[in-house]
Amino acid sequence: MSNVLTAKDLEAIISKGGDPNAAAKDAVLTPSARDTLRDYANAQRRAASAVSGTTTSPTKPLTSKSSKAELEAYFNSPAAHALKEQLCDIGRRLWGRAYVDGNGGNIAIKVGEDIAICTPTLVSKGFMKPEDMCLVDFEGNQLAGVKRRTSEILMHLEIMKRQPKAVATCHCHPPYSTGFAVAGLVPPTCMIPEYEVFASVAVAPYRTPGTPEMGKLVADLVDKHNTILMANHGVVSWSHNNVEDAYFKMEILEAYCRTILVTAQVGKPAQTMTAPQLQDLLKIKQSLGIPDPRHGLKECELCDNAEWRPGVACAVPPKGESATLDAEAERTVQAITDQILAQMK
């Protein structure tokens, strides 16, 4: 006697990465099971098209309202697996550069109108596996995946909802950049071309990580900035290209902040770009589709670093000054000593 399979039976097979077609071959299917099998086949065709770059017959876009079978089929497809591998690769880079500690940091990739694949919670970014990833809707509800989604996913989703161009987001704690975030200070400008072209930085006020309030404060800035310093926390970036590009912004920002701090300790004022030189870089930036609040400003308004207070001065006195200062100090100490001795007598 043939087995009878329901939609629930097929969904269980799909969720475990099995082939529902093989299970259905010698079974009797309920009407809802047939619908599940059809949805699975459509999702597989769509995934194959995404991998090959070709198109098939028009199908509806994948959304949070898609059937469970469609979502599971996509999540277990070759196309989704490739994105999961990218998340693991970026996680290893973040961990290898000490941009994350413990199980800190999180990454997400938009894969549908209102769904995203993201990293799990409580897993080191340096040791993630594709099967650890999670599928969520834009409200933070987990739609697929064995492990729980990152606790900070709401921030990533708020960015994607507020900034339609954002296809990937990356959050981590690079030490030099986070130092600026703790100080509540945007790094000074007009010093290094790569930073001017690829990053546009702002500071978001502190709120408890993972809360909707934190996500909204960050999202308020993503219209004109692609890299946000989160006060007393870390950094989050978004990209209109891919997840690797979102990560690149972290490398660029961290190298820049480190260079700025080294420059502040050299003991000589930094040589900044001229306004026309910066204007040339901003034209390149605009052509690449990267936002910046300085687009359209006059040249005289471009290099305003009035808030930059490094708080570091060269500790080496000018030549010949050391001996003079020491002699004056000795004379002062001697005078005070003489006064004290006179009073004692």
Image: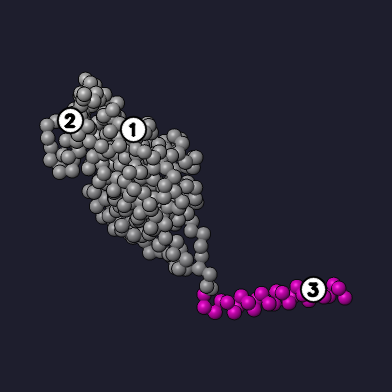
Q: Residues within 10 Å of mark 2 (few under 14, many from 20)?
A: few
Q: Nearer the viewer, mark 1 or mark 2?
A: 2
Circle 2 sits on which residue? 25
Q: Nearer the viewer, mark 1 or mark 3?
A: 1
Residue 225's x, y, as percent? 35, 45
Q: Pick whichever of labels 1 and 2 is earlier in the sequence.
A: 2
Q: CA distance from mark 2 to mark 3?
A: 107 Å
Q: Amino acid at mark 1?
A: Leu
Tell me the residue at 23%/21% (across/down): 30
Q: Residues within 10 Å of mark 3 (few under 14, many from 20)?
A: few
Q: Which region shows up in magenta?
A: 318-345
- Residue 4 vs 310, above or below: the answer is above
Q: Is residue 172 visible?
A: no
Q: Pick whichever of labels 2 and 3 is earlier in the sequence.
A: 2
**Front position in the image: 295 or 286:** 286
**Front position in the image: 60 or 281:** 60
Q: Pick whichever of labels 1 and 3 is earlier in the sequence.
A: 1
Q: Are marks 1 and 3 in contact (CB under 8 Å)?
A: no
Residue 57's x, y, as percent? 11, 32
Quadrant of residue 155 in the image? top left
Tell me the residue at 34%/38% (across/down): 145
Q: Residue 339, which numbered label?
A: 3
Q: Nearer the viewer, mark 2 or mark 3?
A: 2
Question: Element under label 1?
Answer: strand
Q: Is residue 298 left or right of residue 328?
A: left
Q: Is residue 265 left or right of residue 6?
A: right
Question: Element under label 3?
Answer: helix
Tell me the residue at 51%/62% (across/down): 312
Image quadrant where one finds the C terminus: bottom right
